[in-house]
Structure formats: structure tokens, C-alpha cells
Image (cartoon, helix red, strand yellow):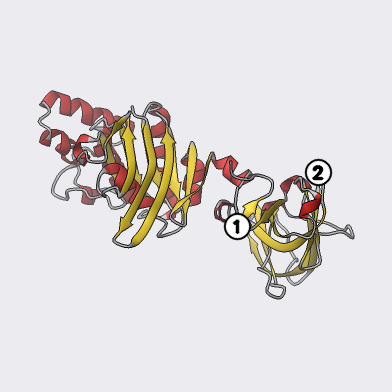
Amino acid sequence: MAHVRLTGVAKTYGAVKVLSDINLDIATGELVVFVGPSGCGKSTLLRMIAGLERISDGTLEIDGRVVNDVPPAQRGVAMVFQSYALYPHMTVRDNMAFALRIAGKGRAEIARAVEDAARRLHLTPYLDRLPKALSGGQRQRVAIGRAIVRDPRVYLFDEPLSNLDAALRVATRIEIAQLKEAMPQSTMIYVTHDQVEAMTLAGRIVVLAGGGISQVGTPLELYERPENEFVARFIGSPAMNLLPGRIEETGAETLVRLAGGGIARAAVATTAADRGREVNVGVRPEDLLPTEEPEALFAGRVAIIEALGEVTVLHFAPQGEAPAVLAKLPGIHAGLRHRTLRLTARPGKVQVFAGGRSLRYPAL
């Protein structure tokens, strides 16, 4: 399959700069997921790789060949769109075979490719059905099959699950993961706004924000070692709590006095020059623990409870201008609404950010 390299890639529409200085290496056989908020340019970047959008600056290489000016059909890529884009008057078999017929492939070769893709995607019983006789998940599998039969060097997925309901999204997500396991040498680039999709599918995640790459890493690297506040809050659900404070003690462990009166101890090395520095302390809701100790990171009144069975999410009443704090406790916790709780967190689970950047995991 293919190695993809983007060097200094940028996209502008007139005076509007959408993406700038995108530098990324995607190895052969990787499944890389682009995530980010709406409007961050993730689909635009995918379309530039596909050749559907011109690259304003920089170079795109596929297997060492610069393809900036190569037509989409000659790049060796296949794209699965958000909409299924199936021909309604054609059967599943004909939809999957159409591109190969246009390319002038022989009947036997087309039949083998369609049968193989249908077997991989569990579509064999549906080959003679029309799209209107399929469920949403089956239609999306046909769209994926249409890409597989072309045997591309790079597979591109543009939010393929966004039109499915919640149950079908889970099922189809698992099917895509199983498909990647069955095609270990296939290079895949996948765009989504759903972080759960990104965390479950990706070998590496590329977080896009502000017209550029905010951080690249494996799902757990982004979850455990965010380099900035945006990634810290974007990855993880519910989002990481950010509490303003000031550094009071430095050294191998840092003590931060929080604006709300709490004390946070973080396993973050700081120097005497950092004393008095204004920072934000980051703690994930699932890392907050109830405590009876006099020293607590946070104390507040529980305003709302989400009892989900396997976990209980506590929403605390806002305190002044500080953002509301959430805690995620394992199991069932009845009778906590309107009670005041004291919470703490282990120092290894506490992040410290200054100027939006992590003091523990600064960007390399």
C-alpha cells in the first residue's frame, strides 16, 4: 500500500486561510484519524489528499511521488463519503462493479473483486438487492465495498457514520475496525468529529484546530499526555475540568492554590522561577475522588446527577466565574444531589497548563 507525506501544506480561499503548515507522515498500513471541531478543516484536508481540492501551498507525496497536480483518478486513492452516493437503480453488485467497468476491467476480474469485497463486508446475501431494500448500515458497507474493489493505495473516509443512528454507528464502527484488521497493509485516513470513533479506530489521531495541527499521537497519548488545553478538553468525555490557580510551591511536585480555595498537588516539575505563576489545573472527571481529608482540590454542591448505571456523573453548581466542575464516579451513587462533596485527585493525574500549554508534556 502507500506512505503519505504532507509537507508545509496550506489551503486558502482568497484571503481566507483555512489550513497552514500541515506537516504529517502517514506510514504504510496506518489508520490515521483526523478530528477537530466543525470548521477546523479536517474534511478539506482529506479532500486535498483525494485531489478534490487544490493545494494552495506545500507538497503532498504518495509513495514518494509528488501528486499535487495529479488528477484524483490517477492518485490511487478511493474515498467513502458521508452520503452513501449509491446509484438507486443499480443492485449492490452493479454499484460495486461500476467503477471497474468504467476502467475497462474484464468480467471475470470484476466478478472476483466484487465477490471478495462482499465476503469481507458480509454483503454476499444482498448482492442482488437495490439500495432501497438495505438498511443504512448496509448501504454504508456497499459504499465501502465500492472503494475496496478498486484496490486503492489509500482509503479515505469522510465522516462515513454520521448519517447512521447510534446503534448502527457502533455496529458499523466495529465492522470498520475488523476490516482494517483483515487488511493490515492498507493505509486509511478517516475523518470524524466523534472522538469515540477516533479513540476506538485510530492507530494515531491528528487533532486539528485553529487552522493547523494541535497534536498528533495515539489515542491514549492524547488522553493521558495532552500538550495543550484544547486537546485536554477535546479528547475525553466528559471534558477535562480546568481550574484557575497560582503556583505556590515548586520542585519535583508542584502545589497550586486554586482560585476557588482548593489545593492541587501535581507530579509536575517546576522551578523557583515558576512560583506565583498563574496556571490552569486540569483534572479529568473520572480522576476526581471523594475525600474527607482537610486538604481538598475542590469542594462544591452537587446540582445535577446523571445516573448511568455503570457510572454516575456529578455536575457541581458553578462558583462565581469559574467553570462548572464535573466528576465521574464508578457505579451507582444515590442521594448525592444537593449535597456538598469534597474531591481530590492523585498528583499523577493532575495536569498543569500555563498560557494554554502543558508544563508536564510540552510540545517537542
Seen in the image, is 19 located left or right of residue 303? left
Residue drawn at (75%, 66%), measured in percent from left and top? 335
Residue drawn at (75%, 46%), measured in percent from left and top? 268
Instruction: Give residue 284's position: percent from left, percent from top.
Output: 67, 53
Residue with the mark numbered 1: 239
Three-letter amino acid code of the residue under disc 2: Ala
Instruction: Give residue 297's position: percent from left, percent from top.
Output: 79, 59
Task: Tell me the SS state at disc 2.
Answer: loop
- The residue furthest bottom is 320
- Which label sits in the foreground, 2 or 1? 2
Residue drawn at (60%, 55%), measured in percent from left and top? 229
Classed neighbour count for the residue bearing mark 1: other residues with Cα under 10 Å, few (<14), some (14–19), many (≥20): some
Quadrant assignment, res 361: top right
Three-letter amino acid code of the residue under disc 1: Ala
Instruction: Please determine whether, in this image, residue 343 is positioned above or below residue 122.
Output: below
Instruction: Give residue 203's position: percent from left, percent from top.
Output: 49, 36
Instruction: Please determine whether, in this image, residue 174 is positioned above or below residue 273.
Output: above
Seen in the image, is 246 located left or right of residue 223? right
Residue 330 in view: no
Q: Which one is earlier in the sequence, the residue at label 2 or at label 1?
A: 1
